Image (cartoon, coloured by chain):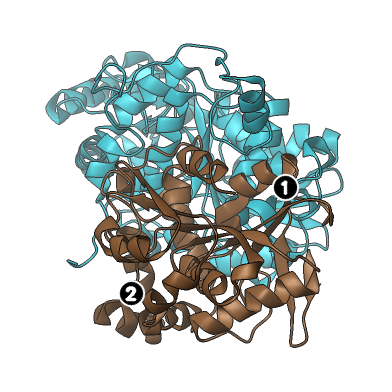
Amino acid sequence: MEIKLKQQTVYAFTAGRDIDANKPAVVFVHGTGLDHTVWTLPARYFGRHGFNVLAIDLPGHGRSEGPLRSTIEDMADFLIEILDALNIDQAALVGHSMGSLVVFDAAARYPDRARSLALLGTALPMAVTDALLESAIQNKHDAIDMLTIWGYSQSAQLGGSETPGMWMVGNTMRLFEQSDPGVIYNGLNACNEYRDGLKRAQNITCPTLLILGDRDIMTPPFNAKQVAGKIPDSSTVILPGTGHSLMSEKPDAVLDALLTIV
Amino acid sequence: MATPKYIHFDTLSLHAGQHPDEATGARAVPIFQTASYVFKSPDHAASIFNIERTGHVYSRISNPTNAVLEERISALEGGVGAICTASGQAACHLAITTILGAGSHIVSSQSIYGGTHNLLAYTLPRFGIETTFVDPRNPQAFRDAIRPNTRLLFGETLGNPGLEVLNIPAVADIAHENGLPLLIDSTFTTPYLCKPFELGADLIFHSATKFLSGHGIVIGGMVVDSGKFDWEASGRFPTLTEPYAGFHDLDFVEEFGPAAFITRARKEGARDFGACMSPTTAFHVLQGVETLSLRMQKHVENTRYIVDHLKDHKAVDWVSYPELPDHPDHELAKELLPRGCGAVFSFSIKGGRPAGQKFIEKVQLFSHLANIGDAKSLVIHPASTTHHRMDAQALEAAGISEGLIRMSVGLEDTNDLIDDLERALRASQKV
């Protein structure tokens, strides 16, 4: 659905359903350079099971107009603007990679708006290598190559898609290639610059679940331990043999984990 | 982090899409010879049906063995996904019908496989899909033939049987300037010799019966989606960009982005037309794909040897192979097919049709049959077989003379192949 905000018209996938004030809401936030389609399977599931689903496209991503929001805090504010526009008081917030920082920040600064929190492929801080930032700022395809290859476990780079017949690496690369120049760098830089998150972790009051891949080299589980320890009510699920692209590599296990928190 | 590296072609040929079976440890791809799959619960079933969870429902739509082949070919082509089909013809049909309907139009190369020509020229018009055939050597002809209702441009990497090299980058540019996708039949070249997506094509189909499998024991096809075409920006493809009543108003581009085409092809075409590949066939094709690069190298090496032997032969009028300097597409072939121009070529024997028939009667190692891409060497007379439904005018337009012989060079020892050819050529000149 299109959502009109003050500055722009943005998009959220609702699993083909209207927003119903009587239903609980779940909001999905994608990573940099990606869009709502990374959440299609769980969004469809929760939509059929009585939830208002909002798989949002961040500004300048997917079907949402720009301008880009350049900090994680700005993106978290954007998320709250969407909830306000739709008169949704509270939602389960689910984010992946950069999106995990967005929902984390939203839950930390607007604790009343988060019913629960799921952080997929997360780390705090989420430092980005100079080589990746340098390639991204120049809009080189190298940046997409790094994000695509490093985004999958060694095993998943050989495929084995749970969705029959899909070449996961190819699909992820195409998604990145669809993003406008500057979008990937904007997101990576926002992740890299988000350094105050740990201080805000204690403000999160809702139940929180970290869903991590034990073969994730972009946000290794080790780097998520700090934030997990600082969120008052948190638990962690580690998916074996899984890289950073959790929803692509292990969609059913991700859904099972989400069912425990959403 | 080390520098990122994509996994290379030969490794993907052997491994893409498969890990050792968790239940049994089987290293080879198991043949899942089953029609259907047990659900864990009613909700699990509903979740798979409604594309909320992954899994298989019925082997007409997907199968674990087929899925390995689909991933493998998609990986080798550089696509987002693929679908196995019952034949190359079924793959062509699936590609077309996923995005075209009654009232739409195709611009196609005129030098294509006879079976595809039949489909486009005679069968699809009954269902309201018309085709204009153009000279594949003239990209401008594709542009000139585009109409308001055109929805697809189509050609083969190497024309059949004239071996016209399609200028894929030029035709792709024309397609994209007009908001249209380019579909390529890549059967003759396989991803080892040509990667049409890297040259600008949007969709590929293969007859997997040929070089992909390489053994001539199965019939099968593949459709591969590059995920690159912007269906929404084009605005001409409602099957992908508007709610589909046949699947709860699913909008495929909205929900599957780059995978919209291949998802619709599976959710509609595989489901409704039902031209699925047997899992045993998929297993056999996989055995071939494992050695694809080795076989293609040898095919090309043998073909070059035989072409070289025939090109100045006293019993031969001419030889057509794009690697020969006098072939009209020689320079383009060097650019687009640097690893070689495949293992199919044509030549004309002095003495016309009677000499040609004698030649075919006398070859022994070369098998006279309607196929290409076998590990064994093959020979055929197109005017009386694969292209027999084309009238004289269409044959001429496709560059097929009555005396033309098409060869598909196999993997035998070239000394034995040359001996066989010499014996038959000598006999042909005594007619």
Q: Give the quadrant of residue A3.
A: bottom right
* Callout 1 amino acid: Ile
- Residue A179, given in percent of the width and then of the height, sits at 53, 73
Q: Nearer the viewer, mark 1 or mark 2?
A: 2
- Residue B420, given in percent of the width and then of the height, sits at 22, 21
Which class describes the residues within 10 Å of circle 2: few (<14), some (14-19), or many (20+)? many
Colour of the chain lettered A: brown
Q: Quadrant of the N terminus of chain B?
A: bottom left
Location of residue A13 with respect to B16 vertically, above or below = below
Residue at point 43% right, 71% down? A201
Residue at point 59% right, 30% down? B89
Check the residue under mark 1 and report the chain it is in: B
Q: Quadrant of the C terminus of chain B?
A: top left
Residue at point 78% right, 63% down? A1
- Residue A251, given in percent of the width and then of the height, sits at 49, 42
The residue singled out by tag 2 in the image is A125
- Which residue is at the front of the view, B243 or A189? A189
Residue at point 20% right, 68% down? B3
* Callout 2 amino acid: Pro
Task: Tell me: B330 left or right of B294.
Answer: right
Colour of the chain lettered B: cyan
Residue B141 appearing in the image:
no
Location of residue B292 with respect to A109 vertically, above or below = above
The residue singled out by tag 1 in the image is B99
Classify mark 2: helix, strand or loop: loop
Task: Tell me: B343 left or right of A13.
Answer: left
**Marks 1/2: CA–CA distance:** 46 Å
- Residue A253, given in percent of the width and then of the height, sits at 46, 39
Q: Give the quadrant of residue A79.
A: bottom right
Task: Tell me: A49 left or right of A152.
Answer: right
Check the residue under mark 2 and report the chain it is in: A
Q: Give the quadrant of residue B361.
A: top left
